[in-house]
């Protein structure tokens, strides 16, 4: 009974609240609107954060992967155009700019560090792949910009030994390119001795550089280019000279050679050849007359001539 009474009281209170809700909403309209706005902002912020961390992060990683793969493709394109006499090394500079943009906007520290390492590689490649001669000032400018990118990568790759080793190795390469071999050797030895980098491929590369650095210290002097030969316009210039000497001919005795009769070919016909003069007269339907042939009278039959046809038979 008590439970039924309580249920009836709650039902009456709910019905009374529903009946008074319009009046309560009019009295508390400002509070309701404020709470609704706050709720919408909270839900919208949660959805935006989810999209930022999930959807945009995946899209950013995809764009970054395509940009990283673009670097070796640009190198191949530059080399192919060089074979045609064209210089498009500026493509590597544009790739370096794009990588810097990605590094500055990346939320992931490891992604930013890798983008900076590839940016430094692009800056160095743009100088080495240039078709024209590179002066010392341009080389130092590119190397200094690459060093800045490598140092930024080291500061971001604190928790990634592999990326940090790659950045330090890049600094050693920069020192080699500017002729500071002692500093490069020190960087390589630090990489090898550091236990944090043990097992990375960069340690093996540093060991290889130390073994071959003696060859890099030697100054390479190129021989002067040979003087180009003038273009050959006549093929006879390529043939060896032919010695000329008088030709000896054994004429022999006058009677040793046969006498060839002299034949005179002139406008007159050869008297030795007589061409019969055949005149064909144009009389129609007279073959014999056209050949000017006169038929003779037929002689009597000799066989019947000895028989007297007037003698009666016996």
Image (cartoon, rainbow, N blue to C red):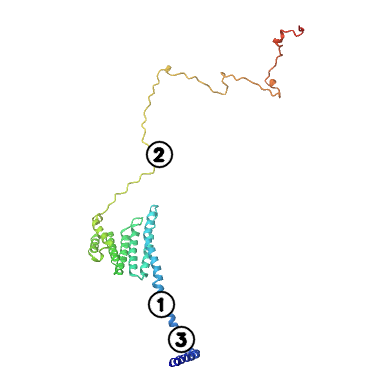
Residue 27 visible in the snapshot: no
Q: Which residue is mark 1?
A: 46
The N terminus lies in which quarter of the figure?
bottom left
State the separation of the CA atoms marked 2 and 3.
102 Å
Residue at the (40%, 73%) spot, across then down: 52
**Residue depicted at 39% across the width and 37% down the height:** 236
Report x, y in % for residue 51.
Answer: 41, 73
**Dot 1 or dot 3, earlier in sequence:** 3
Q: Which element is circle 3 on?
A: helix
* Residue 17 vs residue 179, the one in the foreground: 17
The x and y percentages for residue 8 are 47, 91
Disc assigned to residue 235 = 2
Mark 1 packing: few (<14 Cα in 10 Å), some, or many (20+)?
A: few
Neighbours of disc 2 within 10 Å: few (<14), some (14-19), many (20+): few
Image point (41%, 80%), residue name: 42
Residue under pointer 3: 32
Above or below, comparing residue 171 to residue 18 in the picture: above
């Amino acid at each position: 009974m008590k439970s039924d009474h309580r249920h009836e009281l709650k039902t009456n209170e709910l019905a009374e609240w529903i009946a008074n809700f319009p009046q309560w909403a009019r009295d508390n309209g400002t509070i309701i609107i404020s709470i609704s706005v706050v709720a919408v902002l909270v839900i919208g912020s949660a959805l935006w954060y989810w999209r930022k961390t999930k959807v945009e992060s995946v899209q950013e990683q995809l764009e970054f992967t395509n940009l990283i793969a673009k670097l070796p493709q640009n190198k191949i394109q530059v080399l192919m155009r060089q074979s045609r006499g064209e210089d498009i090394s500026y493509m590597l500079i544009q790739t370096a700019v794009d990588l810097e943009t990605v590094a500055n906007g990346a939320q992931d520290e490891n992604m930013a560090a890798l983008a900076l390492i590839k940016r430094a590689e692009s800056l160095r490649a743009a100088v080495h792949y240039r078709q024209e001669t590179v002066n010392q000032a341009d080389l130092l400018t590119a190397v200094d910009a690459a060093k800045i990118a490598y140092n930024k990568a080291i500061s971001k790759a604190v928790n990634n030994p592999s990326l940090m080793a790659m950045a330090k190795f890049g600094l050693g390469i920069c020192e080699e390119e500017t002729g500071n071999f002692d500093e490069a050797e020190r960087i390589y030895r630090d990489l090898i001795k550091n236990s944090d980098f043990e097992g990375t491929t960069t340690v093996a590369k540093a060991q290889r550089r130390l073994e071959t650095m003696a060859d890099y210290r030697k100054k390479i002097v190129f021989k002067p280019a040979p003087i180009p030969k003038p273009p050959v316009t006549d093929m006879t210039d390529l043939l060896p000279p032919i010695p000329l000497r008088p030709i000896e001919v054994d004429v022999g005795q006058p009677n040793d050679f046969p006498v060839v009769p002299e034949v005179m070919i002139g406008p007159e016909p050869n008297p030795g050849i007589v061409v019969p003069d055949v005149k064909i007269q144009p009389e129609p339907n007279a073959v014999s007359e056209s050949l000017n042939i006169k038929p003779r009278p037929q002689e009597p039959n000799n066989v019947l001539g000895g028989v007297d046809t007037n003698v009666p038979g016996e």
